[in-house]
Amino acid sequence: MIQKKTWSAVVMGAAALIGMATQALAADGAIVTQAPDPHLTVDQAISFALHHHPRLFAYRHRVAARKAKIGEANAHFLPNVGAGALFGTGNPGVSNRPYNNGYAYSPFMPITYGGIGPLGRDGTQTSNVFDASIGATQMLFDFGRYLHLTRSAEKKEHAAIANLVTRDAWVILQVREAYAHLQLDKQ
């Protein structure tokens, strides 16, 4: 036979757990406590526990995180588009290499220190350089690597959902047991 004190302690502990779970901060930083109605039915107590249990919040967020990982894994199948630009100043120095693709000592465009470059610039002038690029890539075939990453992310989401359902069932069981023992203690 179970003593009345033991079940009262269990019910008080469950109530304290639920009470801690219901505390929230208001906009001004004050603590707001939402307490359950003292005359709850078992279904109301279960609903209250499912909506306010802190561990269930964590498991729900884990499910959302796993769902986001599926989108991240699927992103590899989308095209990648990029653009870039570069602007700066440069000093041609003592060679004409920045102005052609030949060598600095090319016989076709020999270096003359008085006039360097295609337009006879001297080596002390600076020039503005601008470069822009745009590109797009699309993965065509990856030998199943990203497909399996996506499937793995989906399975991990299913596991997180199953874990959440298990934790929900555990909370429901705990509330039902506490409620039944409370009813027995009242008799």
Image (tube, rainbow, N blue to C red):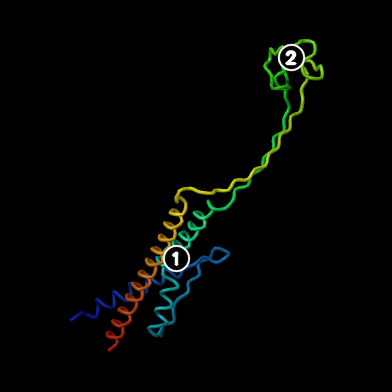
Image quarter in which the C terminus is found: bottom left
Q: Which residue is mark 1?
A: 60
Q: Answer with the quarter of the image where residue 125 lies.
A: top right
Query: Residue 148: percent from the left, percent from the top?
Result: 43, 54
Residue 92 at what x, y percent from top left?
A: 73, 19
The crowd level at tag 2 (other Cα within 10 Å; few <14, some 14-19, many 20+) is few
Graded by Cα atoms within 10 Å as few (under 14), some (14 to 19) or many (20 or more), the crowding at tag 1 reads some
Depth order, front residue of 148/175: 148
Q: Amino acid at mark 2?
A: Phe
Quadrant of the drawing holding the N terminus = bottom left
Residue 76, disc: none
Residue closer to the observer: 183 or 82: 82
SS under mark 2: loop
- Residue drawn at x 79%, y 15% as measured from the top left: 122
The outermost residue toward the bottom is: 187
**Residue beneath disc 2:** 108
Label 1 SS: helix
Dot 1 or dot 2: first in sequence order is: 1
Q: Residue placed at 38% from the left, 67% from the top?
A: 162
Q: Are marks 1 and 2 in contact (CB under 8 Å)?
A: no
Outermost right residue = 119
